[in-house]
Image (cartoon, helix red, strand yellow):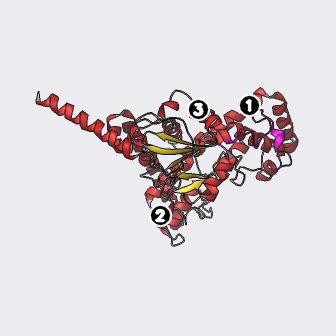
Amino acid sequence: MEIQLSYFLATFFFFLFLLAKHYFNKSRPDQKLPPGPRKLPFIGNLHQLVGSLPHRSLKKLSEKYGPLMHLQIGELKTIVVSSARIAEETLKTNGLVFADRPELLLTKIMFYNFSDLGSSPYEKILEAESTIICRAAVGRRYSDQKALISLARETASFAGIFNVGDIFPSLKFLDSLFGSKRKLVNMHKKVDFILENIFREHEEDRLSITRGQTGDQPLEEDLLDVFLRLKDSDEFQVSITKENIKANILELLFAGIETSSTAIEWAMATMMKHPRVMEKAQREVRQAFKGNKKISHSDIQNLSYLKMVIKESLRLYPPGPLLGPRLSRAKCTIDGYDIPANTIAIINGWAIGRDPEYWDNPEVFEPERFNNISTTFTGANFELIPFGAGRRMCPGISFGLASIEQS
C-alpha cells in the first residue's frame, strides 16, 4: 500500500512539475514572436516532425506560415529559417548571437564532451578556426579503416534520432533508461580505441624523425601531424588537448565520409535520370584528360561544366538538408520579430535551395543555370548553402568539395 502511494505521489508531482514548466515557458504577451502552427501541451510541435522527412515537413509548414517560423519542440524554443533573406539576417547580421550550438547527447558522447570545433562553445574556437586548414585527416591507410568508416556511418544514423534529454532538458536522466545512450557510449569506446592506435603510429613516426631513423625522407604531414606539432609548440595561442585533437579528427572523418558519399550518390543518381547532362559532363572530362591516367588539381579546375553539375546537385540535394542547429546567446530581432535568448535556429538548406524567389524553375535539374553567374557555396551567397554559412560554416568545405570533384 505504501509503495502504491509512493508511485502515485511521484507521478503526481512529476506531472505537476511539467505543468509548472509549461506555464512558465509560455511567451510573454509583450513579445512579438514569429508565426507558427498551434502547439500541443508538453510536446509543442514535435508531432508535426514525426513520421516524415523533417526538411520536407518544415518546408510545407513554411509555405503556410512564412520563411521564419516559431516552433516549440518539447521544451525547446525553436525558429525555422526557410529563405535566403532570413538566413542571411540570422547567420550574418546576427552571426555572433547565433554562434553557439545546442548541447546534444550525440555530440557530448562521441566528440569528447564538445571538444571539436563544430560543437564546442564559440569562445574556445575564435582564435583556432582561422589557423587550422583542413587537410586529409590521417594521411595513410591503417588497419582499422573499415571499422572506423562503419562506425562513422552508424554514428550518422543517430543524428536523426530524437533523444529525450535533447528535447526535454529537464528530463535528461531518462536518457540512461533508453538504449541510444548505451549504444553511443559503446561506439565511443570503439572509436577511441582506433584513434589511440592511430595516435601511437603518428607519434612513433615523429619519434623516428627526431632520432634520424627515416633517412632523407621527410614526413608528409597530414592534419593529425599538424595538430600534434601545434600541441607541442608555442605556435598556438590556445592550448590543444589530446581530446581536442581526437574530437576534431573524428568530426572531419565522420562528416567527410558521410556527407561526401551522400553528395556523390545524389549527383550520380540525378545524372542517370538526365542522360543529356551525363553525356555532356563525360565529354568534358574526356576532352580535358585526353587519355591521361594522372589527374592534377589544375585539370579539375578546368572542368567548368562538372562544377555546374555539382552546384546544381548540391542545390537540390544537400547532404545535410537541415544545417547544424544554432543556439542564440542573447535576444535579438529577425525580420521584425523578437527572438528570445536560448532559442534554437534550424536552417532548412533544402528549402532555401528550392526558393522560387531566387531560382527559376527551382524543382528542375538544370546545371546550365550556373553558367556565367558568380553564385558559390562558400557562404557568400545565402541562396546556396549546402555547407552552411557564417561563423559556424563547415570547416571542412575545401576537403569535402575536393573529395566530391575528384570522385
Image quadrant holding the N terminus, namely top left
Residue at (82% x, 33% y) in the render: 277
Q: At which x and y percent is residue 73?
A: 47, 39
Give the CA distance from mark 2 to mark 3: 41 Å
Determine contact: label 1, label 3, CB under 8 Å: no
Is residue 357 part of the magenta span, yes or no?
Answer: yes
| Label 2 or label 3, whichever comes before in sequence order | 3
> Pointer 2: what residue?
240
Residue at (41% x, 35% y) in the render: 41
> Pointer 3: what residue?
57
Which contiguous range is marked in magenta?
352-373
Residue at (49% x, 68% y) in the render: 238
| Label 1 or label 2, whichever comes before in sequence order | 2
> Pointer 1: what residue?
270
Depth check: give the residue in front, 359 or 380: 359
Of tags 1 and 2, the one toward the viewer is: 1
Give the side of residue 263 with respect to residue 296, left or right.
left
| Label 1 or label 3, whichever comes before in sequence order | 3
Depth check: give the residue in front, 305 or 48: 48
